[in-house]
Amino acid sequence: MCTKVLSQKGVGLRKRIKEMLARKNVRDDFDWNRYSTEYQEQLEEIARVHTEVLTAGDYVFQNDRLQLRRDILPLHPNHQLLYETVLQMNPSSAMEIGCGSGDHLHNLGLLDPSIDLYGVDRSAEQIRLLHKRHPGIAANVVRMDATVVQGARTVCDLAFTQAVIMHIQTKTHHLVALENLFRCARRHVVLMENWTRHAFMDDIRGLFEGGRIPWSDLHFHYRASETDAATRIMVLSAMDLADYPTLTDYDTLLAHSEG
Ligand SMILES: C[S@@+](CC[C@H](N)C(=O)[O-])C[C@H]1O[C@@H](n2cnc3c(N)ncnc32)[C@H](O)[C@@H]1O
């Protein structure tokens, strides 16, 4: 009996060591526990040429377009296309996975205060930064690792990411992150990612066919930025979006990706 317990323990330990060794080869693009300093430097860099944090009246969403109304640096084309697309979907609630500085949650809240906003990030440091940049932000932000299969979760009309899944480099992890994203969304998922980093379309189709996306139907669409034709966003929808081009060929995104 005693031997059996010990040998079972031995098997468990060997299995854990094997898993740990396997994980040595598993690397995201960054060590997220140390990432915040580098990220803040990137934010400073971008702030030289783009407005990152909007104030009331800088932009208005009118006739389905986000329009600049002040003499300020324009938004980054990725961010402009992201906000415009989210606003066109007219969600009552939206969730950002990997919300980092919280700029997108802040800006969306300013552009449409009627949206209930939620954010998650795996890094405590990033969430501290978010509250420093946006004290009293009107969004419910919690710490969560999107690569871990989640039990109870908040479900919103729409969920989105900007530059998150592209940095998650293990196949199983980035698939779980995509699955969680869909499980947080009732109607739409909006992805602003680097399309060369994963075969996003195949991966999402595979998740759907494997029953890991809780929608009865899945439609692939995309939009191109009107200020920068190379910038393209993927829109996944539980229903067909007649006003949006259908994404049939992944190359439509790849041909324009910065790489
Ligand atoms: C490149 S930053 C982008 C942040 C923000 N979306 C933006 O556009 O500024 C990636 C963010 O995703 C977060 N992140 C990375 N892996 C994650 C995971 N597995 N679950 C939740 N957040 C994650 C990081 O902590 C970081 O804040």
Image (cartoon, rainbow, N blue to C red):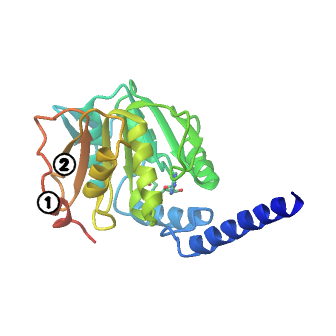
Q: Residues within 10 Å of mark 1 (few under 14, many from 20)?
A: some
Report, in whole angstroms, how far the alpha carbon at label 2 lies from the one at label 1. Answer: 9 Å
At which x and y percent is residue 14?
Answer: 70, 70
The answer to the question of whether label 2 and label 1 lie on touching residues, with beta carbons closer than 8 A, is yes
Q: Nearer the viewer, residue 155 or 23?
A: 23
Name the secondary structure under disc 2.
strand
> In the displayed structure, would residue 91 be above or below residue 129?
above
Kindly identify the amino acid type of the residue bearing the numbered disc 2: Tyr
Q: Quadrant of residue 61?
A: top left
Residue 72 appears left or right of 33 = left
Total marks in image: 2
At which x and y percent is residue 137?
Answer: 53, 36
Residue where numbered disc 2 is placed: 222
Name the secondary structure under disc 1.
helix
Kindly identify the amino acid type of the residue bearing the numbered disc 1: Thr
Quadrant of the image for the C terminus?
Answer: bottom left
Q: Is residue 64 visible?
A: yes
Q: Is residue 69 visible?
A: no
